[in-house]
Image: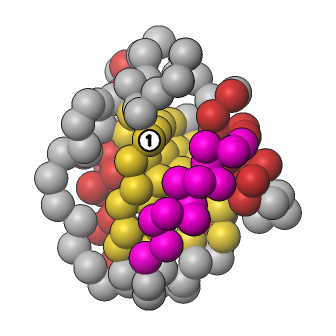
């Protein structure tokens, strides 16, 4: 079954807003720019609160995105137990081609208890590249 895919561009320092609909969803963070730890924490908190329930990171310092989203989810539950439906599996793919990461997200990513309703491509970059990234995801 094919899920809707949406593209969101954030330039480093931009403030993410709103809840992504429909949620819950899976996300690929495409990090084409280095960011400050403070901003990464702010965006990671938004990722958790906006309905993400599986996050895959690729690109610049992608392992730090994995850690930041994990920490944001832990903090959202005051360092206590995270209910199964709010658990956010994360992975980072520093040595993989983006096409392979898209294929993994598209064909293999599933939450253990929640049905994911769509895919979000969160592009962290100075300039947007929506058409090319949506085409690459569709081709995966």
Residue displayed at 69% across by 45% down: 139
Instruction: Residue 130 in the image: state x and y as whole percent.
Output: 46, 65
Q: Position of residue 10 (x, y in %)?
A: 35, 73
Foreground: 115 or 84? Answer: 115
The stretch in magenta equals: 128-140
Residue depicted at 63% across the width and 34% down the height: 106
Describe residue 132's horizontal placement relative to residue 35 as left or right.
right
Q: Is residue 129 magenta?
A: yes
- Across and down, in percent, residue 40 comes to 41, 72
Looking at the rendered image, the quarter that the N terminus falls into is top right
- Figure quadrant of the C terminus: top right
Q: Residue at x 56, y 71 (%)?
A: 31
Name the outermost residue toward the left. Answer: 18
Residue 16, quarter of picture:
bottom left
Indicate the secondary structure of the residue bearing disc 1. strand
The residue beneath circle 1 is 5
At label 1, counting other C-alpha atoms closer than 10 Å, the crowd grade (few under 14, some 14-19, many 20 or more) is some
Q: Is residue 87 shown to the viewer in this render?
A: no
Specify whether 119 is left or right of 52: right
User: Extreme right residue here?
Assistant: 95
């Amino acid at each position: 079954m094919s899920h809707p895919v949406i593209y969101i561009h954030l330039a480093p320092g931009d403030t993410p807003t709103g809840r992504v609909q429909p949620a819950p969803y899976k996300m690929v963070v495409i990090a084409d720019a280095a960011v400050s730890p403070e901003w990464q924490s702010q965006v990671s908190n938004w990722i958790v609160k906006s309905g993400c329930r599986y996050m895959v990171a690729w690109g610049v310092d992608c392992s730090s995105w994995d850690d930041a989203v994990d920490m944001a989810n832990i903090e959202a539950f005051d360092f206590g137990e995270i209910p199964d439906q709010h658990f956010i599996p994360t992975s980072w793919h520093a040595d993989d081609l983006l096409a392979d990461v898209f294929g993994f997200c598209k064909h293999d990513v599933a939450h253990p208890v929640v049905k994911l309703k769509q895919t979000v491509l969160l592009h962290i970059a100075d300039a947007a590249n929506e058409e090319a990234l949506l085409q690459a995801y569709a081709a995966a």
